[in-house]
Structure formats: structure tokens, C-alpha cells
Image (cartoon, grey):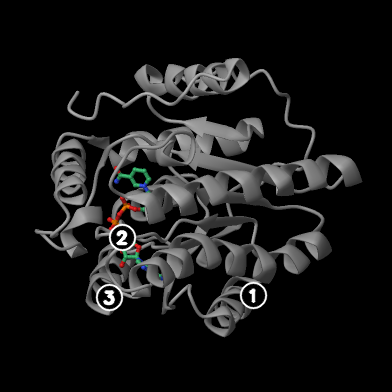
Amino acid sequence: MSDQQPDTVAPARPPVVVAGNVAVITGGASGIGLAVAEALIGEGMSVLLADIDAPKLRDVEARLTEDGASVATMICNTTAEPEVNALIEYALEQFGGVHIMFNNAGIGGVGDAWEDSMDLWHRVVDVNLLGVVHGIRAVLPVMQQQGAGHIVNTASMAGLGAVPGIAPYIATKHAVVGLSESLFLEQLATGSPLGTSVLCPGFVKTDLMDKEPDAVDAPLAQFTNEVLRAGIEYGIPAGDVADQVVAAIKADRFWILTHEDMRQGPAERMQRAATGTNPTLPELGS
Ligand code: NAD
């Protein structure tokens, strides 16, 4: 899908989507991570897939290898910094570099943010926020030494606007947008050869909600749970997101907003902020 923002930024940095280069992808056994892996394999790149879902990872590795791809896999829980460090070391061992780091593993975190135990918050913050932080910290020295590399962090449209009923998800996705923008600006300020993008998808048809509870006690959280399930069921294919991710890396573009019809929401929100107007309820059902 190339109805994205125009690719006006000429890539001044060394290109990274190059046959023989290496991508590391967390949450790579499924959904958006797997689709991006397939797109990069299509560009001739080697890919190291990391995930906590061992059976899925095994199946994916077998299928991709049979198709002749240069692929490795590693069971890696991104919430544990040593495991993510080991992931990057494994990429160096197997393939000799890391040119694209896709910090993508994430969970929905359905539950009652204010009355359930704090475990919910810790779980969502650990995966959706600290997992991304671990990936960046592990790969930056390698990319800096290479003098080339691009980091893509998966946030969400939930990182550019709020809905009621999933506060931990909203909070962590806002945090991923913020830290990604900080990293981008640091690279700009230092004349770094490295690039950064933030991926903000709307609904994408994946397995994201399969691991979440069907029912939650809090009525609002339950309502949002059902809306998210329905949205994802009718979401765009992960392959469309992957095409946009690859195009954005090639164009050295920071923002990757996959849904044309959702781009106005964040602008209107900031307009409300600028004019001191209170938030309004989003049209969750549409
Ligand atoms: P998915 O469930 O198909 O894929 C996520 C993968 O991450 C799974 O394979 C899962 O096993 C893995 N994972 C979960 N926790 C992990 C951990 N601690 N360490 C390593 N791997 C872990 O779902 P998806 O929709 O492809 O999700 C990918 C990313 O996209 C997530 O960050 C999600 O928040 C984001 N996202 C998805 C949508 C959507 O509509 N599907 C929309 C916006 C953002």
C-alpha cells in the first residue's frame, strides 16, 4: 500500500534494506512481526525471529527454511534484558550484523486497570514498553559500530490517542511513541547514521487478542475488549502493514501510520489540547 505519506525524505543514511543484510524481529512468530519478516526475506535479507511462543516459532522456521529463506529463530522473552542482549549476540554469531531491529513484541493487556492487581500494569509495561527499551539498548552499540542501522518500534494508534477501558495499553503505546521520537531527535542532533521509525497501526488482523481473557469484570473494560476483538477480526492484513514498514525504512521515514482514515484523530486531539478543550469520546464502534 503506497497511499502513505509521500516519501519525500531522501535517504541520506546508508540503505539498510539490502540483500544479505540482517533483521532481528521480536514477536516474530506471528502477525505483524512475521509479515515484516516475510517482506524483508523477499528483499533478500537474513532474519532472526524472536518470540516466546516456541511451537509457533518452530513451525515458522521450518516453513521459511523450506522456502529457501535465510532464517534463524530464538526463544526470547523481551521483558528480560539479558535475553534480549543474548538475542543480538546470536544475530552477530549467525549473520555477522544487525541492520534492522524491529521491536514489535506486544500484548493487549485486557483487564481492570484500577481494581485488578498491579500485575496487569507490570505485565503490560514489561512487554510493551521495557521490551522495546531492551531491544534499543542491546542493538544501538552494534549499529553504531557498523555505522548503519534502522530501528522500528511498534506502538499503535493507541499511542496517539486514548480510548476508555485499556489504560495500560494506551499508556505503554504513548510511551513507545515518545521514546521513539526522542531517539530519532537524538540521532538528528548528533548527525547519527542510524534511523528510527515508529509503527502506529490501526486494526490489523492478527492473533493479538487470542491470548487475552474473553471476559473481564469491569463493564467498560469488557466493552473495549469486545470492540478490540471485532476491530482486529476485520482489520487490514498484516502483509499490508509489512509493505508500509519496508517502504518507510527505505524512505527513512519516522512515522508509519498504516490507516489513512485514522490520521485525523491525533491532529484533532492536539487541536483540542492547544485550545484547552476537554477530550471527547472516540467512536469506538465504527
Ligand atoms: P500477535 O499476537 O499476532 O503477535 C505478537 C507476538 O509477540 C506473538 O507471537 C507473541 O507470542 C509475541 N510476544 C508476546 N509477548 C512477548 C514477549 N514478552 N517476548 C517475545 N515475544 C512476545 O499480534 P500482532 O498484532 O502482530 O502484534 C504485534 C505488535 O503490534 C504488538 O506490539 C501490538 O501491540 C501491535 N499492534 C497491533 C495491532 C492490531 O490490530 N493487531 C494494532 C496496533 C498495534
State left or right for residue 280 relative to residue 189. left
Q: Residue at x 44, y 78 (%)?
A: 76
Circle 2 crowding by C-alpha within 10 Å: few under 14, some 14–19, many from 20: many
Q: Residue at x 31, y 27 (%)?
A: 281
Task: Give the amino acid at mark 2.
Answer: Gly
Instruction: Kindly report the distance in space between the C-alpha atoms of the residues bearing marks 3 and 2.
Output: 25 Å
Q: Residue at x 32, y 69 (%)?
A: 61
Q: Are marks 2 and 1 in contact (CB under 8 Å)?
A: no
In this rendering, is residue 128 above or below 251? below
In this rendering, is residue 3 above or below 32? above
Can the viewer see residue 17 in this picture?
no
The image quadrant where one finds ligand 1 is: bottom left
Residue matched to label 3: 58
The quarter of the rendered structure image containing the N terminus is: top left
Which is more N-terminal, label 1 or label 2? Answer: 1
Residue matched to label 2: 109
Task: Give the amino acid at mark 1.
Answer: Leu
Instruction: Kindly report the distance in space between the C-alpha atoms of the residues bearing marks 2 and 1.
Output: 33 Å
Number of numbered tags placed on the structure image? 3
The percent position of residue 269, horizontal first and vertical second, equals: 49, 23
Residue matched to label 1: 92
Q: Secondary structure at mark 1?
A: helix
The percent position of residue 241, horizontal first and vertical second, equals: 38, 37
Instruction: Kindly report the distance in space between the C-alpha atoms of the residues bearing marks 1 and 3.
Output: 21 Å
Nearest the camera: 175 or 217? 217
